[in-house]
Amino acid sequence: MPEAILTLNAGSSSIKFGLYTSESGNLAIRVKGEVEDVGDDLRMTAKDGYGARLADEDWSGEAGSTDALFRRLLDWIEAHLGDDHLVAVGHRIVHGGRDFQDSIRLTVDIVSALKGLTPLAPLHQPRSLAPIEAILELRPDLPQVGCFDTAFHRTIVPPASRYAIPSALEDEGIRRYGFHGLSYAHVASRLPDMLPGRRKVVVAHLGNGASLCAMRDGRSVDTTMGFSALDGLVMGTRPGLLDPGVLLFLMKEHGMSHDDLEDLLYRRSGMLGVSGLSADIRVLSSSDDPRAREAIDLFAFRVARETAAMANTLEGLDSIVFTGGIGENSPLVRRLVCERLVWLGVAIDPAANERGSGIITTDGSKVTAVAIAADEEIVIAEDARRLCGGTCIPAEASSRKMLSRISLKVRK
């Protein structure tokens, strides 16, 4: 019986899903969709592998229950399987801590261990785990695989992985982890064909969440995000790099609590905070409000500044890759970033940049810049097939060794 794999990528305001089937040994996308939070409503849209619309439905009735939402999604997916058989579900999980450095079959015990990492990613980890727990309840016999955003950065070593804090805190797990690893893994898999011979590459995953990764020969050696998804670049609603003294000041002089700071840093800062208008680059780009342009300029300035820092880690720069929702779709942001990097040898081609796919620099540019679409889901699907396709050992057995190694203790 033909096999199919479902991927789920739960973000801050949407759940992206993909249905993949095997064709001549390769995975092919059959359905690609999203359940998006639009105001107080949920809307499910889906297209087939050729881009033709399959669905555009109001799912607001499921907004109050995670189980109800995923029951409806699974029912919809299974109704579109045809002769295929769903063999696995693959998930993006934001934080794997020190111990989860490879994709893994998920069990109740593994999920419990991953919940213990929630203090490391309080906004993202619960959203990553909610679909897993719902499917464990709804389809307990359906194999599930977790793929970690932190795993791609396991190759980062000191000094790039260290903070200048007491070693006892480092031993406790306070270190630089990095995120957006599935997006970077997808880019790394394409680099040999896309940019042959380029060994030193900075990849810019730019979206509502944004980061850079310095890759040497396709391996991560540095990144802008660190212990949490708050560090590094300006983002949609997150500030990125921020003097810790600001937080101490707000606690002392404004009486802000932990919850107040969490709300400020995760939901009210970034381009939304600077502009006072929106976190959406499309809204800001079309606005005449000077605060909107200020937010975009700050975003581009920080991307360019941190690109130079990544080039320093690499001791040179061959190429820049733009990906993610903003990176692949905003000619304005790409132009503003590249104009700040002329001194590094970046010469943008305006017409190519407007087209926005493939190489966007001139033939004479010393540094080649490229725009490509992100595809985290294919990375998830490939790992799910590797771990669950055909015959494989039971999930409990494959997870027991991992559980025995987990030692990260998070101070509550």
Image (cartoon, grey):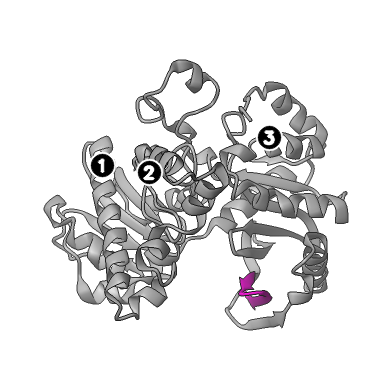
Mark sitting on residue 309: 1
Q: Nearer the viewer, residue 319 or 9?
A: 9
Residue 411 within the segment the image draws in magenta: no
| Residue type, numbered disc 2 | Thr
Q: Up-down: is 58 above or below 384?
A: below
Q: Up-down: is 383 above or below 173?
A: below
Which quarter of the rendering shows the C terminus? Answer: top right
Q: Up-down: is 231 above or below 350?
A: above
**Residue 17 % position (x, y):** 65, 64
* SS for callout 1: helix
Q: Closer to the observer: label 1 or label 3?
A: 3
* SS for callout 3: loop
Q: Earlier in the sequence, mark 1 or mark 3?
A: 3
Badge 1: few (under 14), some or many (20 or more) residues near its Cα, within 10 Å? some
Q: Residue at x 36, y 30 (%)?
A: 160
Check whether the beta carbons of the residues at disc 1 and disc 3 lie within 8 A of each other.
Answer: no
**Residue 137 % position (x, y):** 86, 52
Mark sitting on residue 224: 2
Mark sitting on residue 116: 3
Q: Residue at x 14, y 54 (%)?
A: 345
Q: Nearer the viewer, residue 267 or 220?
A: 267
| Residue type, numbered disc 1 | Ala
Q: Closer to the observer: label 3 or label 2?
A: 3
Q: Quadrant of residue 32?
A: bottom right
- Going by the image, does 101 lie left or right of 283? right
Q: Earlier in the sequence, mark 1 or mark 2?
A: 2
Check whether the beta carbons of the residues at disc 3 and disc 2 lie within 8 A of each other.
Answer: no
- Going by the image, does 125 lie left or right of 361? right
Mark sitting on residue 104: none
Q: Nearer the viewer, residue 304 or 40?
A: 40
**Residue 217 % position (x, y):** 36, 40
> In whole angstroms, how far apart are the C-alphas of marks 3 and 2?
24 Å
